[in-house]
Image (cartoon, rainbow, N blue to C red):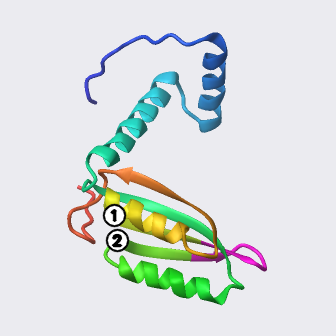
Amino acid sequence: MPSMERFTISLPAQLAADFDQWIEKRGYTNRSEAVRDLVRGTLASDLVTTLPDLPSVASLAYVYDHHDQTVSGRLAKAQHQHHGLVVATVHAHLDHERCLEVSILRGPAAELGELANAITALKGIRNGRLHLIAGESETVHGAHSHD
């Protein structure tokens, strides 16, 4: 286990109560675990802006109207233009009109953001969101080890 450094923070009573409710909803066993995850997430997000070439992984989820026959073609074109970044895509029918796709991405953080912007800006995409995890990509595609 890495060495730990202890520090104290002060919060207004209502903010502390709201944080405790958030902790409970998320299933953390204590405040320290929650604060560590929040700090890690914030620092990783900051890395993306300071190190745009940082190898990263991401999921990009987006919803679109499947009755618009041209959306699929535009999506395929965008994905093929960035084929080195797209690891896999899962497609699901939500209802009679809407489809959800989730793409697993791997590559430099800035390029993943550019691809996400290109896809979510396509005509026919109702909404989408990128979840980027900075600094978590293998340098070799397909490398896998549990050592």
- Give percent across and percent down for residue 30: 52, 24
Magenta-colored stretch includes residue 109 = no
Residue 136 location (% of width, % of height): 31, 53
Q: How far apart are the two marked residues, 1 and 2, measured between alpha carbons?
A: 8 Å
Residue labelled with disc 2: 85
Q: Nearer the viewer, mark 1 or mark 2?
A: 1
The amino acid type found where label 1 is placed reads Glu
Secondary element under disc 2, as helix, strand or loop, is: loop
Residue at the (55%, 64%) spot, across then down: 61
- Could you tell which of marks 1 and 2 lies nearer the N-terminus? 2
Q: Hey, which residue is sitting farthest right in the picture?
A: 96
Question: Which residue is identified by label 1?
Answer: 111
Above-or-below relation of 126 to 91: above
Identified at 60% across, 11% down, the residue is 12
Residue found 29% across the figure and 59% down from its top: 137
The number of discs equals: 2
Quarter of the rendering containing residue 73 = bottom right
Q: Say whether marks 1 and 2 touch (CB < 8 Å).
A: yes
Instruction: Find residue 83 and name its label.
Output: none
Residue 34 versus residue 100: which sits nearer the camera? Answer: 100
The residues colored magenta run: 91-100
Q: Residues within 10 Å of mark 2 (few under 14, many from 20)?
A: many
Q: Does the stretch in magenta take in 96?
A: yes
Secondary element under disc 1, as helix, strand or loop, is helix
Q: Position of residue 54 (x, y in %)?
A: 26, 53
Observer-nearest of 27 and 61 = 61
Residue 93, percent from left and from top: 69, 77
Above or below, 129 relative to 67: above
Residue type at tag 2: Leu
